Amino acid sequence: MSKLKIAVQKSGRLNEDSMKLLKDIGIYIDNGKDQLKASAKGFPVEVFYLRNGDIPQYLKDGVVDAAIIGENVLIEKGNDIKVAEKLGFSTCRVCIAVPKSSTYNSIKELNGKRIATSYPNTVQNFLNENGVNAKLHIINGSVEIAPNIGLADAIVDIVSSGSTLFKNNLKEVEVILKSEAVLAVSPLLSEEKQAILNTIQFRIQSVLKGRQ
Ligand code: PRP
Ligand code: MG
């Protein structure tokens, strides 16, 4: 019998809660952190530990069958990937932030300004919807430093507790979208694997109900 390949974040904020959810639904894995792949005991599932940003492409290509991933990453990179379940953890929002000292009244004020972000597609769509023309600087991490080093006038990044914005003297001025961890599914999923996925989804629904 073929195994369902599930991707989880290798390291980062989703990893721990993702592994806990798998454990709660009875998928036990020897979690050698250096392993990139591990088989579950007594269940036809293999877990792949991958970089967040790579997961949408693996789903599209059918290299993995499903993934536990932040909805924000799917929205940025994963058009046409289905969300099977919202998982209720790792909630955050993708926000525009500007220096605390700056006056900000409307999105229109970002016309001609520089915005640093790791979410260029999400930002560009939002700017287009609002008829704003700005210059994007793509940075892969520590985006909040950009205004302080003179690289950008504003940033777009995920905000959870707000502590990173606070420490960098930034204030949130627009929420572009809200996100949480989701179970995402490859468009190339076979019928055989869909049956395994159905079992997993059923178990997830029971566990999430119990957590409420
Ligand atoms: C993430 C994100 C924000 C921060 C938000 O960064 O990019 O900077 O967390 O969380 P907070 O509102 O609770 O402070 P992360 O620490 O994962 O590092 P990175 O940006 O370098 O990837
Ligand atoms: Mg960050």
Image (tube, helix red, strand yellow):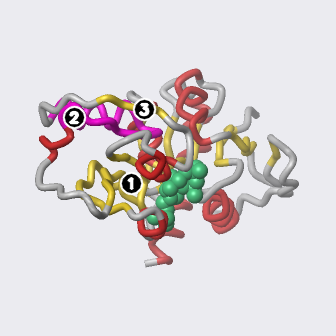
Percent from the top left, x then y, of residue 28?
A: 77, 60
Helix, strand or loop at disc 3? Answer: strand
- The residue that mark 1 highlights is 179
Left or right relative to 5: residue 111: left
Q: Which residue is mark 3?
A: 137
| Residue underneath mark 2 | 127
Name the residue rendered at 32%, 37% in the picture. 123
Picture coordinates of residue 154 (x, y %)?
Answer: 33, 46
Name the mark nearer the viewer: 3 or 1.
3
Q: Residue at x 23, y 54 (%)?
A: 174
The amino acid on which the numbered mark 2 sits, given as a three-letter code, is Leu
Crowding around mark 3 (Cα neighbors within 10 Å: few <14, some 14 to 19, many 20+) is: some
Are the residues at dot 2 and dot 1 in contact (C-beta closer than 8 Å)? no
Element type where label 2 sits in the image: helix
Question: Which stretch did the figure color magenta?
Answer: 111-129
Q: Earlier in the sequence, mark 2 or mark 3?
A: 2
Q: CA distance from mark 2 to mark 3?
A: 14 Å
Residue 67, percent across and down? 58, 43
Upstream in sequence: badge 3 or badge 1: 3
